[in-house]
Image (cartoon, rainbow, N blue to C red):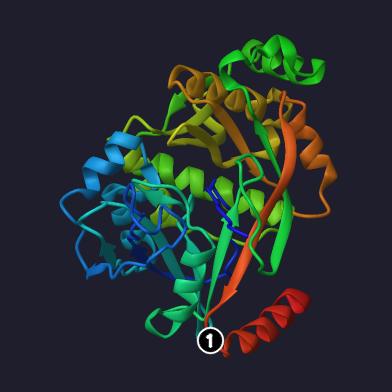
Amino acid sequence: MRYVARWQTPQVDIGPGSRPRQSILILQLPRKNSPARRGRRSMPDPIVSSTPPAEWSAQCARCHLLFHSSDWIKLLEASFDVKTDYLWDEDTGCGAALSSFKAGPFRIGYLGFPAGGLVGGIGPDAPTIEHWRSRGGEMSPVAIRIPVSGFVDVGEFELAYEATPETAIVDLPSWSLDNVSGNHRRDVQKGHRSKLEVMDASSDEDAAAVFAIYKETLKRRRGTMRYNATYFEKLVALARQRSDIRVMLAKFDEKISGFTVIVRHGAVASYLHGGIRLEFRHLQPSALLIHEGIEWAQAQGCSSFNLMSSPPGQPSLVWYKEKWGAETREHRTYVLPLRPSYRLFQAAERLYRRFR
């Protein structure tokens, strides 16, 4: 059986205080009429480099790949002490990303951070997965987590996986506020009537306020902090330079009541982050910001709007997302063990989740 996977933005939880290490794997896709195209796939020997190849930026710009761009990688390096390695096949100019995050004494890799996939080609298939397994000793992580969106045409890997509900507006061009739930329509209208102002974050002070709301929201929901203050500072700065990132603020009487981060990667817009201050909840800043983000994504020409995966056991959150005219499918994160020490990590992870 042959397996193919393409990717969407995953949710990543590597525990508090984790520090990522990112490696970029550029993998060869078979050329037309090659033995691999005829069913006898041969794996490449990629070129390993600590600097991006000359073709990298052009490939990312041509395909609107924010999360593979040098700008995004620099943001990660500045925020999380990330080391980036590039493996490049000059003949085909294709690639993928593997981010290895520090988790205690271990490193856990994620295929693409956070969106995954290849630059200049399709996602990996089963022979590619086996190639990674055979070269596991050359890689930093003890295992690779491979996120697979439920909204792409994929097969299945013969690997263990974790499933979460993923919600998205599939046909974004035809989406209209008239077609969403009455409650959401009223919330958006109330946001407009309350004289909330939606604007883009533009300063370090804005970034600090966003991070404060992010922390407050996580505490309220008992979530795990995955991003730090430097990340949001760099994110706001990058949004001022690129048209595929929006860090939106809802202000009332000059006070920030909430924020939302919407990005475009390929043809998909994704709700990356968001939060509100409880004292402004009655003004409906969240609904107003989501509506603004959806309309922005439509104007960008995106085909879908991904509201991301929800944690298991939170059906009310899934229901809230679906009321925006979205549907929910199963998102899978496959795990490819590379070293025997991964079993030790699994035991440590179980203890962490039990006693945190």
Q: Can residue 203 be seen in this view?
A: no
In terms of depth relative to the viewer, which is nearer, 80 or 5? 5
In terms of depth relative to the viewer, which is nearer, 281 or 320? 320
What's the residue type where badge 1 is placed?
Arg
In terms of depth relative to the viewer, which is nearer, 127 or 129? 127
How far across and down, in percent of the image, does residue 182 sit? 81, 15
Query: Does residue 71 lie above or below 158 as drawn?
Result: above
Query: Does residue 232 lie above or below 25 as drawn?
Result: above
Q: The C terminus is located in which quarter? A: bottom right
In this figure, which residue is indicated by the disc labeled 1? 339
Query: Which of the 4 image quadrants contains residue 160?
Result: bottom right
Query: Does residue 342 lie above or below 153 as drawn?
Result: below
Residue drawn where x is 28% and y is 55% of the image? 74
Residue drawn where x is 58% and y is 57% of the image? 2
Disc 1, SS: loop
> Is 323 on the left-hand or right-hand side of 308?
right
- Would you call the spot at circle 1 few (<14 residues within 10 Å), some (14-19), or many (20 or more)? some
How far across and down, in percent of the image, does residue 65 sit? 37, 41
Query: Does residue 314 lie above or below 264 as drawn?
Result: below
